[in-house]
C-alpha cells in the first residue's frame, strides 16, 4: 500500500553499504520505520530526507513492518539543529525520548505537534532547558503519568507549601510529606512553573526567563518524575548532563 504522510525524522541509522533506515513520527500514522535506499550515496536525491530532525512529506510503500521510501519533499530541514552543538543535544534528547516511549504505529498526533513546536522553539532561541521540561511533561501526559499538582495527592488538602513525591504521582501537603522521605521540597517559583508546564502547549510558548536556582530545582524534579515513571536510559540525556557539567565547571 502507498502512504503519504507528514513526518519528522526522530532516528536515522545506516543499513548496509548505501541505505538508511529512518524512524518517523508522523502526524497521522504514529511512529513507523522506512527504508531509504541509496541515502548514503553522495548523489542520492533522498539523502537530505534521511537526516535527523528533518520535517517533510514522505511517500512510501508498506505492507507489513518496514516501509520503503518512494518520494519525499522537505518542509523544514532543521539543519541548524544538527549544526549547533547545544541545539543538537536538546533536539536529540527530545527525539530519542519520543522514539523510546512511543510504540510502533501508536497514535502520536499530539506528540508530533509538540515535537515540531519544540524544534521551532529551539530555533527561535528560547530556553532549551525549559523547552525540554515542557516536552517531558507532554511525554508524561501521553504515558498516563501526568502529576497531580493542584492538591495533595494523598489527602486532597490544598494547604501548602507542597513537596513533590514522584512515587506518589504528585504533590504532598506538609503533613503527608512527613511520611515520604523521597518528597522533594520546591520553591514558589519552581512550583508555579511546574503547574504552568502541566497545562501549557508548546505551540503557545512565549519568552520565559527563569532564575538559575529555579532551573536547577526544575531539573531535579523533572528528572525524578521521568526516572520513576518512564525509567528509560537515554544516551542523549547522558550527553546533556556532560555538556551542562562542562558549561558550569
Image (tube, rainbow, N blue to C red):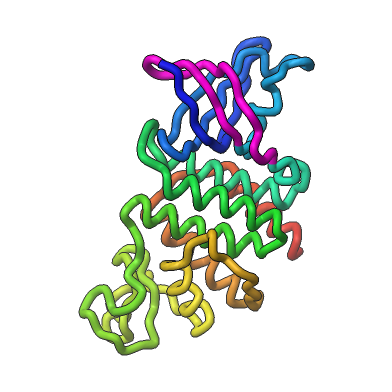
Boundaries of the magenta span: 56-77
Could you say which is closer to the camera, residue 222 or residue 138? 138
Name the side, left or right, on which 165 lies relative to 94. left
Find residue 120 and report its horizontal and vertical position in percent. Answer: 64, 53
Q: Residue at x 77, y 42 (%)?
A: 83
Q: Quadrant of residue 121?
A: bottom right
> Looking at the picture, does residue 186 appear above or below residue 31?
below
Q: Position of residue 229 (x, y in %)?
A: 36, 54
Examine the rendered structure and indicate whether residue 39 appears above or below residue 74: above
Which residue is located at x 69 percent, y 43 percent?
A: 78
User: Is residue 49 part of the magenta span, yes or no?
Assistant: no
Residue 155 can be seen in this image:
yes
Q: Return the residue found at the far top.
A: 17
> As drawn, is 81 to the left or to the right of 144?
right
Residue sitting nearer the eye, 208 or 46 = 46
- Residue 62 sits inside the magenta stretch: yes
Q: Quarter holding the C terminus?
A: bottom right
Q: Residue at x 48, y 79 (%)?
A: 192
Amino acid at each position: 500500500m502507498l502512504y503519504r504522510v507528514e513526518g519528522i525524522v526522530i532516528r536515522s541509522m545506516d543499513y548496509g553499504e548505501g541505505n538508511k533506515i529512518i524512524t518517523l513520527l508522523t502526524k497521522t500514522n504514529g511512529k513507523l520505520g522506512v527504508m531509504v535506499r541509496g541515502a548514503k550515496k553522495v548523489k542520492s536525491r533522498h539523502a537530505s530526507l534521511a537526516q535527523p530532525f528533518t520535517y517533510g512529506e514522505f511517500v512510501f510503500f508498506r505492507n507489513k513492518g518496514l516501509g520503503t521510501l518512494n518520494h519525499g519533499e522537505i518542509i523544514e530541514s532543521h539543519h541548524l539543529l544538527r549544526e549547533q552543538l547545544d541545539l543538537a543535544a536538546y533536539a536529540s534528547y527530545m527525539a530519542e525520548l519520543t522514539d523510546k516511549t512511543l510504540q510502533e504505529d501508536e497514535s502520536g498526533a499530539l506528540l508530533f505537534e509538540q515535537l515540531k513546536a519544540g524544534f521551532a522553539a529551539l530555533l527561535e532561541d528560547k530556553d532549551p532547558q525549559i523547552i525540554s521540561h515542557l516536552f517531558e511533561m507532554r511525554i508524561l501526559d501521553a504515558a498516563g503519568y501526568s502529576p497531580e499538582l493542584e492538591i495533595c495527592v494523598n489527602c486532597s488538602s490544598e494547604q501548602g507549601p507542597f513537596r513533590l513525591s514522584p512515587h506518589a504521582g504528585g504533590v504532598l501537603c506538609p503533613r503527608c510529606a512527613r511520611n515520604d522521605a523521597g518528597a522533594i521540597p520546591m520553591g514558589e517559583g519552581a512550583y508555579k512553573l511546574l503547574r504552568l508546564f502541566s497545562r501549557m502547549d508548546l505551540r503557545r510558548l512565549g519568552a520565559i526567563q527563569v532564575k538559575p536556582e529555579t532551573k536547577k530545582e526544575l531539573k531535579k524534579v523533572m528528572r525524578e518524575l521521568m526516572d520513576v515513571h518512564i525509567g528509560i536510559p537515554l544516551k542523549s540525556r547522558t550527553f546533556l548532563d556532560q555538556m551542562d557539567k562542562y558549561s558550569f565547571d
